[in-house]
Amino acid sequence: MLRGIVAGLVAALVSASVLAHKFPDLSCRAFSGKFVQLTTKSGRRFDVYRTGPPSARVGLLLLPGKAGLDQHTLAWADRVGAQGYRVLTMGLGSKHKDGSAPTGTHGRSVARERAALHYLSAPGRKIVTFGWGRAGALQSIQASAADPSDVSGTVLCDGGVSAKPALLRKLKSKVLLVAFQKTTAPAKLQAFEARMRFYGKPLIVHYYNIDPAAANPTGRHFDSAIAQEVWGQARIFFRQIVFLCRRCAPYPRLLFDYRR
C-alpha cells in the first residue's frame, strides 16, 4: 500500500515533464521550469526546457553543447531564469518523442534553432543565444545566423570557435566571447577575432588564463569568485543588449503580449 502511494507521488511530481522517461535521474530535484515540445516548419518535433519569468525583457537560448539536457543543465537554466531572464535550453540533437532519429545534420539543426528562437520571441524582448564549450559556441553562432534579424546578442563561452565565414557574414548581433586560454589555443582565438574584424562584426572579448572548470558550479574545481566574474561579464552584456536599439520599439512592461 505504502509503496503504491509513494509511486503515485513520484508519478505526480514528474508528470509535468513529458520527457521524464528519457531523463530518469531528474525526478530527484524539483525543477522550476517545464519541458515543452516544439515543431519545425517541416513538422519535425523536438523537446526543450523552458524556465524564467514570461515578462522578461531578455530571452536566452541556452546551448550547453555536448552536456545536453541533463540535470546540471536544467539547474543552470533555473538559476539563470531566477535572475529575471526567460530561458529556453535545448540539446544538440535529442531524439524526438515519436522515436525518430536525432536531428544531427546542419539543415535540421538550423530548423530546430529557428523554431526555438521563434518560440522565445515576444514583443519588446531582446533575444540572446548563449553557447558553452566548443559545440555550444558553434551552435550559438549557428542559431544567431539562422535568424539574424531577431537575435540581438550572441555569447560564446569557452568556445574554440571555428565557424565558417558563411556563418559569420550572416551575423547581425553583438558578440561576446569569454575565452579560457587553458582549453583553447590563443592563436585560434586571435584568428577568430581577426575574422570578426574583417567582416565588420561587433565583438567583445574577455580572456581568462584559467581552467574553465572553475566556472562550472557542478564540478569539483568550482571557484565562486571566478564564476561570479565570468557571469558578471555576461550580465553586463545583457544590459547592453536591453538598451540596444534594434528594429523593435520599446513596450511598457504591462503591455507585453506573452502567450507562453
Image (cartoon, rainbow, N blue to C red):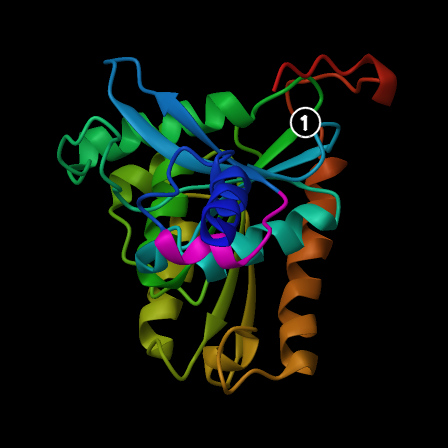
Describe residue 33's horizontal placement relative to residue 62 as left or right: right
Residue 34, image x and y in percent?
54, 36
Describe residue 58's horizontal placement relative to residue 190 as left or right: right
Taking 4 as reference, is 133 above or below it? below
Q: Label 1: how many residues lie within 10 Å, few (<14), some (14-19) or many (20+)?
A: many
Instruction: Looking at the picture, tell me which residue is in the foreground, 71 or 125.
Output: 71
Q: Helix, strand or loop at disc 1?
A: loop
The count of marks equals 1
Instruction: Looking at the picture, tell me which residue is in the foreground, 94 or 247.
Output: 94
Taking 189 as reference, is 71 above or below it? above
Instruction: Looking at the picture, tell me which residue is in the foreground, 100 or 173.
Output: 100
Question: Which residue is painted at 67% across and 52% down in the image?
Answer: 237
Q: Quadrant of residue 127?
A: top right
Question: Which residue is painted at 40% across and 84% down in the image?
Answer: 182
Question: Which residue is painted at 21% across and 29% down in the image?
Answer: 108
Residue 258 appears in the figure: yes
Q: Is residue 3 magenta?
A: no
The residue at the far front in this view is: 1
Q: Which residues are magenta?
A: 24-32
- Image quadrant for the C terminus? top right
Residue 73, image x and y in percent?
47, 56
Residue 104, image x and y in percent?
17, 40
Residue 149 appears in the figure: no
Residue 160, image x and y in percent?
34, 66
Instruction: Looking at the picture, tell me which residue is in the foreground, 157 or 95.
Output: 95
Question: Which residue is painted at 26% across and 30% down in the image?
Answer: 97
Q: Amino acid at mark 1?
A: Arg
> Mark 1 sits on what residue?
125
